[in-house]
Structure formats: structure tokens, C-alpha cells
Image (cartoon, rainbow, N blue to C red):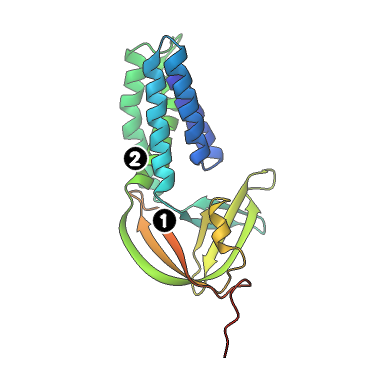
Amino acid sequence: MFFLGYLVFYSVLSLLIDLSVFFSILSFILGGTLYFNSSSPLQGIAICAFGLLILLSSLCYHSKKICAGGSSFVNYDTSYNFLSVSIATVISAIPIWCIIVKTDIIEIGGSPLYIFIPSLLISWAILFKIVDRIFIHNRKTQEVVLGDYFTIHRSRRSLIHVYIFKFKDSPDLYSTGMFRQRIFIDKIGSKFSCTFGKGIFGTSYITSIKLIEDAGVNAPIRKK
């Protein structure tokens, strides 16, 4: 029961923000506490294992491609194949729903169909936030020049920040984490070596990025 609540909490939270290593650490703490201080150590093991999957998925990529759309105040969302994610989510939600209903994890007062909604949410989070990132393929490495980087709010009423950067001669935008964006500080015009890849649902990722030629503010002055 507790593990199910944990999965639902993770799924709802992943709709709002891109969960990082910190959530994995919290999962390890919570799982370890349950393992040593409860009558259900298996739930603690399951939470620790799930936290390990979240950690692995967050370490598999540096940033992801986003699609921008809207008015002057833009909402930025991850670019992916909506149809393939939707079909896979529905198919994967069915066994999750069956397990919840048949094992009597929770008391079902009325129709068991309403349990299918959180099953869909859990399925989507696992597929899109974990599986898609672990199985990145079609990797290719190329040299690119940083065009710009900036920080925005996700929406007018949101306090959540999104960290964006783009390369010169490319219209594509990529989002990354607060700490990962530090590599771009004062590095506009600098050359980077990037490894690009694709998730199984068409999401474009940068799996690694390395500065190879510093042309930014902090670049050393070259003697003529």
C-alpha cells in the first residue's frame, strides 16, 4: 500500500517538475527507513530499487530537446512522439491496474475502473521518465557552438524554473538542470563536443557535453 502511494506521488510530481538525483536520495532514505523500522521490509526494498532506477535514468542524459509554443510568454515542453507514448501508456497501465485490483492492495468501495486513472499516471511516469531515458540509442557525436542560454518560468503562475540553451545555426532548444547549466556560464561562442541520442519515444537527448574550445568571457587571452 505504501509503495503504491509512493508511485502515485512520484508520478504526480514528475508531471510538475523533472525529478533529479535528489529524489533518488530521498527514496533511498525512505526505503531504508521502511526496511529497518517497519513490518514490511519488502516495500522498503522496492522503494530503494525504484530510486535506483530514477538515479540511473537521470544520469543517462545531460539535457533534452524541447518544443516551444505559445505567445510572448512561452511554455516549454519536451519534444516527443505523443501517439507512441499514449499507446504504450494505455497498454502498460492494464497489468498495473490488474495487479492493484486482484491483490487487494487497496479497498475498492465502488467500481474498480477508477483505479485505472492512477494506473495510467504510474505507467506514463515509468515509461516516459525512466524507460525512455535509459534506452537512448542512435548516438552520434558532433562539435557545436553555444549560441545562448537563459532561464525562464515554466508558466506565468509557476515558480518552477526551466534552464534553456541553444546552439548557433540551429533552431533547436534544449533544457537541462540548474547545476548542469553551469557549464555554459560565460561560454557563449565556445565550442562543445556533444553526443546526441534518441529515446524510444522519439525524445531527443544530449547524453554528454564537453567544452573543447573556450571563447567566452573567461577565455584566456591569446598572445599574437
Secondary structure at badge 1 equals strand
The percent position of residue 51, horizontal first and vertical second, equals: 43, 32
Say what amino acid the circle numbered 2 marks.
Ile
Q: Residue at x 32, y 27 (%)?
A: 94
Q: What is the number of callouts on the image?
A: 2
State the image coordinates of residue 107 (x, y, percent, origin top left): 44, 9
Nearest to the observer: residue 168 or residue 74: 168
* Dot 2 or dot 1, earlier in sequence: 2
Q: Nearer the viewer, residue 3 or 216?
A: 216
Q: From the viewer's perspective, is 21 left or right of 151?
A: left
Q: Name the quarter where the C terminus is drawn.
A: bottom right
Horizontal and vertical percent for residue 179?
56, 51
| Nearer-the-camera pick, 128 or 86 | 128
Q: CA distance from mark 2 to mark 1?
A: 22 Å
Quadrant housing residue 194: bottom left
- Relative height, residue 208 to residue 159 (above, below): below
Name the residue tied to disc 2: 87
Residue 73, image quadrant: bottom right
The amino acid type, in three-letter code, at marker 1 is Tyr
Residue 162 shown left or right of residue 67 in the figure: right
| Above or below: residue 42 compared with residue 75 | above
Q: Which residue is at 51% across, 27% downward?
A: 9
Graded by Cα atoms within 10 Å as few (under 14), some (14 to 19) or many (20 or more), the crowding at tag 2 reads few
Q: Determine whether the residue tagged by mark 2 lies in a helix, strand or loop.
A: helix
Q: Quadrant of the N terminus?
A: top left
In this rendering, is residue 22 above or below 201? above
Name the residue beneath numbered marker 1.
205
| Picture residue at 47% right of the left edge, 13% below the top | 37
Which residue is drawn at the image coordinates 58% and 54% (left, top)? 163
Image depth: mark 2 or mark 1 in front: 1
